Image: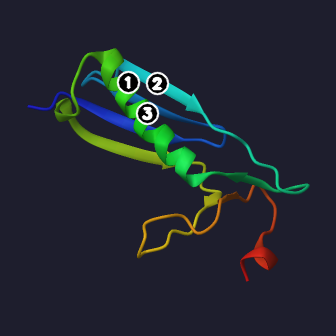
């Protein structure tokens, strides 16, 4: 029977995975920063493949640190900063563009 829950926290500068027991205590955590790309003043982007790889790495890292397997997780929640978007090609599964971090800026002309 699964004993733990996990949470992926996809932040503006890093990806974190935390594992909690039934009492809400953290039993495993791993975090990895990712590159901030500034293509022009006021713009912030991320490499979506780097973000995806970071998510996979921190999940594996936290599981290893907690000495548990993925089958020990009953559920995994995901949260992000809600201001980043990425377009994926439905046929290839690859990103079309970098992740655009809105951070209060307007990307409308770029996306039209």
The mark found on residue 62 in the picture is 1
- Between the residue at mark 1 and the residue at mark 3, the CA separation in whole angstroms equals 9 Å
The tag earlier along the polypeptide, 2 or 3, is: 2
> Which of label 1 and label 3 is nearer to you?
3
Query: Which quarter of the picture shows residue 84?
Result: bottom right
Pointer 1 with pointer 3, Cβ within 8 A: no
Pointer 2 with pointer 1, Cβ within 8 A: yes
Query: Which quarter of the picture shows residue 110?
Result: bottom right
Q: Residue at x 62, y 51 (%)?
A: 47
Say left or right for 80 vs 63: right
Nearer to me, 81 or 43: 43
Asked if 83 appears above or below 19 in the picture, the reply is below
Nearer to me, 47 or 24: 47
Give the residue at the far bottom of this rendering. Answer: 112
Q: Secondary structure at mark 1?
A: helix
Q: Residue at x 43, y 70 (%)?
A: 92
Q: Which residue is mark 3?
A: 57
Q: Residue at x 26, y 16 (%)?
A: 67
Q: Residues within 10 Å of mark 3 (few under 14, many from 20)?
A: some
Q: Which residue is mark 2?
A: 30
Q: Residues within 10 Å of mark 2 (few under 14, many from 20)?
A: many
Say left or right for 80 vs 6: right
- Between the residue at mark 2 and the residue at mark 1, the CA separation in whole angstroms equals 5 Å
The tag earlier along the polypeptide, 1 or 3, is: 3
Q: Position of residue 39 (x, y in %)?
A: 82, 56
The mark found on residue 41 in the picture is none
Q: Position of residue 109 (x, y in %)?
A: 81, 78
The tag earlier along the polypeptide, 2 or 1, is: 2
């Amino acid at each position: 029977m699964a004993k733990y829950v996990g949470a992926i926290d996809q932040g503006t500068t890093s990806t974190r995975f935390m594992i909690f027991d039934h009492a809400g205590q953290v039993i495993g955590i791993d975090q990895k920063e990712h590159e901030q790309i500034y293509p022009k003043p006021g713009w912030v982007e991320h490499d979506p493949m780097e973000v995806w790889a970071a998510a996979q790495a921190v999940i594996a890292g936290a599981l290893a640190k907690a000495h548990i397997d993925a089958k020990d997780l009953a559920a995994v929640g995901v949260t992000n900063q809600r201001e980043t978007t990425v377009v994926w090609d439905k046929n290839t599964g690859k990103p079309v563009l970098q992740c655009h971090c809105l951070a209060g800026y307007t990307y409308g002309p770029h996306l039209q």
